[in-house]
């Protein structure tokens, strides 16, 4: 076990370059194209007032028809389908909250899932069993183990149609998971890096103190970064921490400017002066943090790329369709029972 990221197996075995990550994904993509050339057939129904084509209708008068999801579509491809990534993220968080599991263990489970699905198609395995197993294994590694029967019971209460009642299915999947992870299970997260950077900023020559709201916002951004699994496969934890801190401070500055610009003429002088003072303080924080970035010799290209990917995530999140991805997984697993075990 390595106490430092720089000498850890995470850096030596599970940190990719853009080119090597693209090769891994291309390999899985080609495998999926070969194994599932016909894509996924699903049964759709739409409201229909009149059936002129003699199509089948259900008891609600909805027209029923078959639709094919081509294998080349982005649906159900981990590297391309943001609906799948966001939904999977929430699956782990939901199970973790039911069991009061620490955030660090849940973050480790997110990394295990991202690494596993870099090698294995979601069409080959039961995603819900994978989520349960990732949480089970991460809790053992992060030294907050869960009783397997309790874990399986809670998972079945959330997803009864997908989780088998036999706890040995989780232990069997655990061996499969460890094998695909090459037995490298120690994960270093950006949370510790964030705390160290905040301590550094408090000292000379920066004297920059972030309030509790800013720290909480940064923590939330780091949580969301596990949906953008590329950044955790490409970059060091401190890059992600710096990026989230930059976004937090920048948003605070933008918010204060907008508040000042949106003030109308009816606002009293004291309120206007207070808003102007906050705007100057936040602007100064931004300048200090920018100086810290310049002097710390952090790779700014990696920071900017992480920021851009975070922005892209939230753009996709606005169009997140949970109903659609749940429907596809239902069609994939419950119409193909062999994938459930």
Image (cartoon, helix red, strand yellow):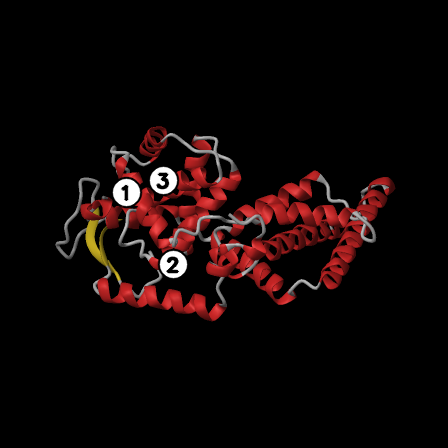
Question: Which label's residue is closer to the chain start, 2 or 1?
Answer: 2
For image coordinates 61% across by 57% down, the residue present is: 239
Q: How many marks?
A: 3
Q: Are marks 1 and 3 in contact (CB under 8 Å)?
A: no
Mark 3 to mark 2: distance in Å?
18 Å
The one nearer the camera, 329 or 130, is 130
Q: Is residue 195 left or right of residue 82?
A: right
Question: Which label's residue is closer to the chain start, 1 or 3?
Answer: 3
Q: Is residue 198 above or below residue 166?
A: below
The one nearer the camera, 253 or 94, is 94
Crowd tier of the residue under label 2, counting other residues whose Cα lies within 10 Å: few below 14, some 14–19, many 20 or above = many
Q: Which mark is residue 172?
A: 1
Question: Which label's residue is closer to the chain start, 3 or 2?
Answer: 2
Crowd tier of the residue under label 1, counting other residues whose Cα lies within 10 Å: few below 14, some 14–19, many 20 or above = few
Mark 2 to mark 1: distance in Å?
20 Å
Q: Residue furthest bottom?
A: 19
Secondary structure state at the residue bearing disc 1: helix
Q: Residue furthest front?
A: 1
Mark 1 to mark 3: distance in Å?
12 Å
The one nearer the camera, 237 or 220, is 237
Q: Quadrant of residue 77?
A: bottom left
**Label 2 sits on residue:** 118
Residue 14's spot in the image, x, y percent?
46, 58
**Label 3 sits on residue:** 132
Residue 299's spot in the image, x, y percent?
64, 65
Q: Is residue 57 above or below residue 304?
A: above
For image coordinates 50% across by 50% down, the residue present is: 226
Asked whether residue 141 is in view, the answer is yes
Q: Is residue 73 left or right of residue 8?
A: left
Residue 144's spot in the image, x, y percent?
47, 34
Residue 133's spot in the image, x, y percent?
36, 42
Please name which of the two marks, 2 or 1, marks the residue nearer to the observer: 1
């Amino acid at each position: 076990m390595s106490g430092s990221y720089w000498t850890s197996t995470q850096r030596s075995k599970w940190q990719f370059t853009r080119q090597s990550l693209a090769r891994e994904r291309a390999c899985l993509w080609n495998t999926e194209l070969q194994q599932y050339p016909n894509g996924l057939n699903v049964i759709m129904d739409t409201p229909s007032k009149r059936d002129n084509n003699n199509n089948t209708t259900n008891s609600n008068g909805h027209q029923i028809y078959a639709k094919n999801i081509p294998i080349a579509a982005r649906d159900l491809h981990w590297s391309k389908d943001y609906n799948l990534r966001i939904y999977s993220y929430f699956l782990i968080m939901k199970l973790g909250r039911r069991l009061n599991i620490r955030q660090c263990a849940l973050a480790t489970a997110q990394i295990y899932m991202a690494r596993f699905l870099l090698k294995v198609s979601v069409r080959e395995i039961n995603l819900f069993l994978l989520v349960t197993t990732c949480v089970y294994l991460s809790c053992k590694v992060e030294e907050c183990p869960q009783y397997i029967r309790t874990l399986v019971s809670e998972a079945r209460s959330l997803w009864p149609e997908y989780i088998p009642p036999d706890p040995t299915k989780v232990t069997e999947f655990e061996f499969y998971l460890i094998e695909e992870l090459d037995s490298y299970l120690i994960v270093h997260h950006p949370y510790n890096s964030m705390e160290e950077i905040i301590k550094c900023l408090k000292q000379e020559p920066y004297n920059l103190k972030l309030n509790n709201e800013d720290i909480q916002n940064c923590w939330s951004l780091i949580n969301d970064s596990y949906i953008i699994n590329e950044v955790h496969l490409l970059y060091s934890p401190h890059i992600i921490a710096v990026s989230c801190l930059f976004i937090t401070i920048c948003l605070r500055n933008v918010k204060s400017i907008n508040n000042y610009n949106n003030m109308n003429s009816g606002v009293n002088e004291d309120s206007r002066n207070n808003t102007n003072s906050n705007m100057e303080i936040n602007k100064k924080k931004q300048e200090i943090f920018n100086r810290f970035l310049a002097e710390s010799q952090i790779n700014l290209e990696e920071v900017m790329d992480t920021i851009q990917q975070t922005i892209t995530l939230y753009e996709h999140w606005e169009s997140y369709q949970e109903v659609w991805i749940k429907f596809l997984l239902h069609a994939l697993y419950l119409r193909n029972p062999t994938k459930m075990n």
